[in-house]
Image (cartoon, rainbow, N blue to C red):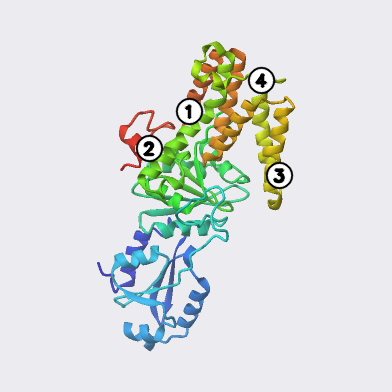
Amino acid sequence: MNISTDIEVNKLHFDALFCTKRNFDLKKRELIIAGKPAVLYMIDGFLRSDVLERILAEFSFLKEEDADSEKEFFEHGIPFAGVDLENDDEMITTAVLSGRTVLMVDGFENAFVFELRNYPQRDNAEPDRDKVLRGSRDGFTETMLFNAALIRRRIRDCDLSIEYQSIGTVSKTDIALCYLSGKVDKEMLSDVRNKIKNSKIEALTMSQEDMANVINGKQRWNPFPKYKFTERPDVAAAQIMQGDLIVLVDNTPTAMIMPATIFDIAEDANDYYFPPLTGAYLRITRILTMIVTLFVTPVWLLALEYPEKVPEVFRFVLVTENHNIPIIWQLLILEFVIDGLKLSSLNTPGMLSSTFSIIAGIIVSDFAVKSGWFASETMLYMAFVAMANYSQPGYELGYAIKFMRMFLLVGTALFGIWGFLAGIVLTLWLLLSTKIHGKGGYFSPIIPFSAKGVAKLLFRLK
């Protein structure tokens, strides 16, 4: 449909289309050019404001005869080469959502579309925690406006809404709710809005963690995360397309995604940048690795507690060499030592990190076995656990599995098979009792079971 020559009709149409009162980053500017009412539509995060200021300064010198006709204004009144004429409202909408600046003047049949885009780009290539072998290499920054523009660049649709909110009685931190109005869970969106509006928090000093506490309350004893976090705009855009809600917080490069099941949190961008068969293999491998990481040391300890129950084919797992420290203490000590080495690596200068890793991984472990502190089997299993934890893209999920594994170890050491079973029951209870926003449960599509959901989860089927 073509736009009207009446500027007021055009403003009513595009104000409703763009939801200018709801989208904080989609700007509207009304002005007078050569005595004619005009209006500008633009997305702030894409705009080269210095060039636009120079164009507007030139408009201020135009006389009424310079805008007698659209052709006269286009040829002599616009001091910019990158401008096109467009009169189809759908094309104009796409142009604005793509980051171009649109000018409409009263009495003219066409809109003037300016190429003033300046896509934001992160200085470093991609986030350290969310690297991919294929795909884009950009990442979110600490500026919320730029992050919103990175999402806009991937979703050029009028249904995409980026609502501005402010939270914190003292800090008044800027946040944005990003969603597709036709797909998002309206009940979840309304609930999040109300919790943000009624929040009495002074400041988001811990950014997303404080934001999670505002939305869902403090989570003290359940270690399993309720939200998925990402620094990748392509992942955030993909989740929005699926109907999820994205929360952007100013001063942090991480986006919060809700709702998120445990399988969503364990998902990785690489699963989707490869063919379906390869992606399914990577996804299944990651889920199996997560399960093995949880049970490998507790099951081994259980085998040592009941050696007579171990089948002959698996008796090689039993410890035959002498050791000075009980196996349970060896496992628990190594659990803490691994985290201690992780913390020390955070403060190690980059040029020395590889050297210290070699020292810790080879020399220390070798002497620990020879001195009688640890059995070689203990070092082997804990080395696997330490490496396998990095297969999970979710940092919080890795520690949740770690805490459950330690509880299984302690229960098995104290009460044998009954302690092991109690640890499994506790893990399942925590998983099933974890409540998330939106429809479905934390263990969906396994509980409640959905064959189509499982097929989509494992094999990327539609």
- Callout 4: 10 Å neighbours few (<14), some, many (20+)? few
Q: What residue sits 47% from the left and 82% below the top? A: 58
Judge depth for marks 1 and 3 and give the one in front.
Answer: 3
Circle 2/circle 1 CB separation < 8 Å: no
Compared with residue 299, is residue 9 higher up or lower down, i.e. above or below? Answer: below
Q: Give the residue type that dot 4 points to.
A: Glu
Where is residue 201 shown, x and y percent of the image?
A: 59, 42
User: Picture quarter containing residue 367?
Assistant: top right
Judge depth for marks 2 and 1 and give the one in front.
Answer: 2
Q: Which residue is mark 3?
A: 356
Q: Give the residue type that dot 2 points to.
A: Leu
How far apart are the alpha carbons under marks 3 and 4? 29 Å
Judge depth for marks 3 and 4 and give the one in front.
Answer: 4
- Residue 218 in view: no
Compared with residue 449, is residue 69 higher up or lower down, i.e. above or below? Answer: below
Earlier in the chain: of badge 2 and badge 1, it is 1
Q: Which residue is mark 4?
A: 321
Judge depth for marks 1 and 4 and give the one in front.
Answer: 4
Earlier in the chain: of badge 4 and badge 2, it is 4
Q: Which residue is mark 2?
A: 458
Q: Give the residue type that dot 3 points to.
A: Phe
Quarter of the picture holding the C terminus: top left
Earlier in the chain: of badge 1 and badge 3, it is 3
How far apart are the alpha carbons under marks 4 and 2? 42 Å
How far apart are the alpha carbons under marks 2 and 1? 20 Å
Q: Is residue 353 left or right of residue 33?
A: right
User: Quick one: SS at disc 3?
Assistant: helix
